[in-house]
Image (cartoon, helix red, strand yellow):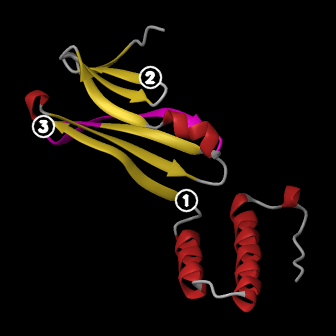
Amino acid sequence: MSYTIPLVANLDQESLQGHYSQILLLGLQAANRAMPIPYEYCVDVLKEFKQGGFRNSWIHEDKSWKRYDCRSVIQADLTTEKLVLEQHIFRNEHPLMKKQIAETKPREALFYPLMGKLKVESGQFLVFETKAGMALFRFDLNTNSWAEIKI
């Protein structure tokens, strides 16, 4: 099988992703002829990915603390260009703050260490601590503001 792709430099991201999608579809068709694979399922997932703008979004962490009337959500958005983690903070179930807390290339080896857990430190600071033990942000629950991270 062959597939002719125009010069990548001349393509916008949407067109480029469309070509990648076609290449994957051709590969699935070839694999389906060679061995039993869940072809229809794979094609449906590819279509869904395309309809979603070639973006994989999920809630990485969603945690509430009744004691502090606080809820925090870490939203992850993965594209072929980057992974972005965005922090959403709610007080009394009302949106209070939203901030991008991390951005990296879409390579698991780069973004996996950025994944982590939400916690409250010292009864005052909402913190997202990475698997490496690094705080990506500190939010002061007393002042409802971002606190400086001391490294």
Which residue is at 13% across, 27% downward? 68
Q: Is residue 98 magenta?
A: yes
The picture places residue 53, in percent across and down from the top left corner, at 57, 65
Q: Do the residues labelled 2 and 3 touch (CB within 8 Å)?
A: no
The residue indicated by pointer 2 is 133
Could you tell me how far apart the alpha carbons at marks 1 and 3 are, in whole angstroms? 31 Å
Could you tell me how far apart the alpha carbons at marks 1 and 2 are, in whole angstroms? 28 Å
* Amino acid identity at mark 2: Gly
* Helix, strand or loop for the magenta stretch, by majority: strand
Query: Counting residues from the N terminus, which is met first, the one under dot 2 or under dot 3?
Result: 3
- Give whichever of 98, 133 is nearer the camera: 133
The residue indicated by pointer 3 is 92
Q: What element carries label 2?
A: loop
Magenta segment boundaries in residue numbering: 89-105
Determine whether 51 is above or below 150 in the image.
below
Which residue is at 21% across, 13% downward? 122
Give the quarter of the image for residue 90. top left
Residue lying farthest to the top in this orientation: 150
* Amino acid identity at mark 1: Arg
Query: Counting residues from the N terminus, which is met first, the one under dot 1 or under dot 3?
Result: 1
The residue indicated by pointer 1 is 55
